[in-house]
Amino acid sequence: MANADKPFGARWIRSISGSEPIINSYVTVDEDTAAIFVGDFVTSDDSVGADETGKPVVITAGVGGPLLGVCMGFEVEPTNLETTHRLASTARTVLVCDDPYAVYEIQENGATDGAAILEAEIGENSEIVLDQTGSTVSGQSRTELESDVTGTATAQLRVMRVANRPDNVIGAFCVYEVMINEHERKDTTAGVA
């Protein structure tokens, strides 16, 4: 049975520390021109640091480089209750799971060359893929896991295992459990496969 191609960004499933999700408030600033969706990876905005209240500023993460965590949601915007994501160029409070030991589920991108992650590559590291924009209707991210893995320490995510789901098999668009390897608050490690 082939996996369905339904990217959903990253979903928190547990922490290897055994704790509940650690979620902290961060903010975005008007100058940031990228939207943020639930399930998007975010990173600290080093060019701004913090806003006038002292809250740290985040931006949507790019491919390569350290990650702070995953957007889990937003504080309610009283003037627009139907907004399900952070609109580009708007200030918004973002709720981020910034636990360096959080485990997430994410769909692999089913590379166009057909080279899906192999069983022997579980334990290796990989990057995020930002080929699709999140849904402005549901507010859900469409970020995926790059199927081209590497054994080096310089990749954003560690592929831990195939997610235990009845509709999930190794191959294109498989859903994996991952941890952030290049976390802003911990050292990186090479893959172990």
Image: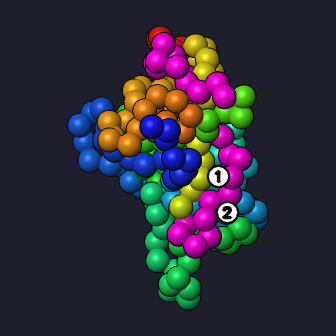
Residue under the image location 56 percent in, 85 percent down? 80
What distance separates the C-alpha of mark 1 from that of mark 2?
7 Å
Image quarter where the N terminus lies is top left
Q: Residue at x 62, y 70 (%)?
A: 136
Q: Residues within 10 Å of mark 2 (few under 14, many from 20)?
A: some
Task: Sort mark 1 into few (<14), some (14-19) or many (20+) by Cα contacts within 10 Å.
Answer: many
Answer yes or no: do the residues labelled 1 and 2 have beta carbons within 8 Å? yes
Tell me which segment is drawn in magenta.
114-139
- Disc 2 residue type? Ala
Question: Which label sits on residue 35?
Answer: 2
Q: Main secondary structure of the magenta part?
A: loop
Q: Report if residue 129 is visible in the image.
A: yes
Q: Is residue 183 visible?
A: no
Horizontal and vertical percent for residue 170? 46, 28
Q: Position of residue 84 (x, y in %)?
A: 53, 72
Q: Say what amino acid the circle numbered 1 marks.
A: Thr
Secondary element under disc 2, as helix, strand or loop, is: loop
Quickly name the residue at label 1.
60
Q: Residue at x 51, y 47 (%)?
A: 4
